[in-house]
Amino acid sequence: MRQRLLPWCVWVIVILAGAPAFAEQAVVAVAANFIPPFREIASEFEKSTGHQLQVAGGSSGSFYTQIKNGAPFDVFFSADRERPKLLEDEGFGVKYSRFTYAIGRLVLWSSNASLIKGEETLRSKQFKRLAIANPKTAPYGVAAMQTMQKLELWDSLQPHIVMGESIGQTMGFIESGNAQLGFVALSQVMDAKFKGKGSRWEVPTNLHESIKQDVILLTKGKENPAAKALLEFIGGPQAKAIIERFGYELK
């Protein structure tokens, strides 16, 4: 009997030795622009720690409202610095947990490989629809608006503009052909689904305010080991390498 049980006992010991003693789960709100790299980061995090993540993607403005209304998120990756700071000041975020995890890049992108030639494409107005994220809810929408204002094109392009509630929906407009081009995040264009496709113009950073993106531990997650481990992981070399590969700058 001992000989028959021994292999089973050894197998159990191996499995337990490879698992974390206290694996937990965290619910994470992630700005739509950061979803492409976060898929890889989440996978590496789960492999390294054994913790599990539930991830929701959307606009930073919408998440801010949801968190204030009691949404059960433990961590918030915003596309700006303003909303995490407000959540911290208003008691929804843990003080001193907030930091800049990435600096985003804005691009003008089209699925048409020959459409975009640079800012002159905007001036030509040889298109019906130009997609941007809603500046009221999405920081990349603010950057797009600032770019067009700096180029003195904001007013003249109004008849062509269609707005998505998030940068993810904005990309959907372009991908579906409902808009011929649009302002999106470089990280979206670097995603495997779109990499090397279409045409793009990387918007010079002097045409808009810096897109500094902050993460914050929310009060609902302050005692959650998985949430705290995720913040530590984001500051580590594995996550930073992925973030840079998707076109972000690091602070």
Image: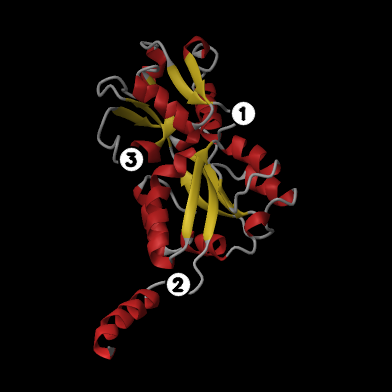
| Residue topped by disc 2 | 20
Query: In terms of depth relative to the viewer, which is nearer, 240 or 31?
Result: 31
In this view, the mark in front (2 or 3): 2
Q: Amino acid at mark 1?
A: Lys
Q: Is label 1 in a helix, a strand or a loop?
A: loop
**Looking at this rendering, what residue extends furthest in the right direction?**
90
Ranked by sequence position, the earlier of labels 2 and 1 is 2
Asked whether the residues under the numbered discs 1 and 3 touch, taking CB atoms below 8 Å apart as contact, a structural biologist would say no
Spatial CA distance of label 2 from label 3 is: 33 Å
Name the residue at 40% across, 63% down: 237
Query: In terms of depth relative to the viewer, which is nearer, 150 or 55?
Result: 55
Q: Is residue 203 visible?
A: no
Q: Amino acid at mark 3?
A: Met
Q: Is label 3 in a helix, a strand or a loop?
A: loop
| Residue topped by disc 3 | 190
User: Badge 2 local density, few (<14 within 10 Å), some, or many (20+)?
Assistant: few
Which quarter of the rendered picture does the N terminus lie within?
bottom left
Ranked by sequence position, the earlier of labels 1 and 3 is 1
| Residue topped by disc 1 | 136
Left or right for 32, reference 12:
right
Spatial CA distance of label 2 from label 1 is: 42 Å
Left or right for 229, reference 46:
right
Name the residue at 28% across, 37% down: 195
> Residue 201, how many percent across, how many down?
35, 29
**Looking at this rendering, what residue extends furthest in the bottom direction?**
2
Picture quadrant where residue 35 is located: top left
> Residue 141, how many percent across, how many down?
53, 29
Asked whether the residues under the numbered discs 2 and 1 touch, taking CB atoms below 8 Å apart as contact, a structural biologist would say no
Ranked by sequence position, the earlier of labels 2 and 3 is 2
**Looking at this rendering, what residue extends furthest in the front direction?**
1
